[in-house]
Image (cartoon, helix red, strand yellow):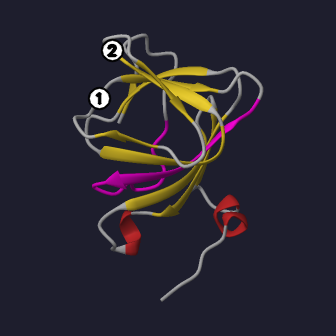
Amino acid sequence: MFVRSLLDVEATDHFVEWGSGTSHRLLTEKDGMGFTVCHTVVRANTVSLLQYRNHLEACYCIAGEGEVEDMEGNIYPVRPGDIYVLDKHDKHYLRGGGDRDLILVSIFNPPLTGIERHDLNDQSGSAY
């Protein structure tokens, strides 16, 4: 058993500024659990085009507000208590709220190494 806090992660390279927010990679590949758990902040008034080609992701909203949009133009508001699931390596737009950050618990399978970074300047979308 072990316990790890957000403050513990902030002192490591597993605290990632990803361009539109931050990600505390609380549980990573080296922990041997077979999945990753992140505390993810999506800043208000940001838009990011993302795709996880090598990972499936589920995001559970614990605070704030935002939305996710699929490539067909369907927009899904995300509020506390909602989960969105990218079960087909879905390319998507992730948006922080108009007035508030979106706070998520993000689960990745297979696990992240913890040091992956987005490239939000890639017009085809950031992917890893």
Q: Is residue 75 above or below residue 11?
A: above
- Few, some or many C-alpha atoms within 10 Å of disc 2 (few <14, some 14-19, many ≥20)? few
Residue 58 as seen in the image, left or right of residue 120: left
Q: Secondary structure at mark 2?
A: loop
Q: What residue is shown with label 2?
A: 71
Residue 70 in the figure: left or right of residue 83? left
Indicate yes or no whether the magenta region holds residue 18: no
Residue 90, quarter of the rendered image: top left
What's the residue type where badge 1 is placed? Asp
Distance from label 2 to label 1 (Cα)?
Answer: 8 Å
In the foreground, 99 or 118: 99
Asked if labels 1 and 2 touch by Cβ distance under 8 angstroms, the answer is: yes
Label 1, secondary structure: give it: loop
Tell me which label, 2 or 1, sits earlier in the chain.
Answer: 2
Q: Residue at x 39, y 23 (%)?
A: 92
The amino acid type found where label 2 is placed reads: Met
Location of mark 1 (residue): 90
Residue at the image position 36 percent from the left and 64 percent from the top: 29
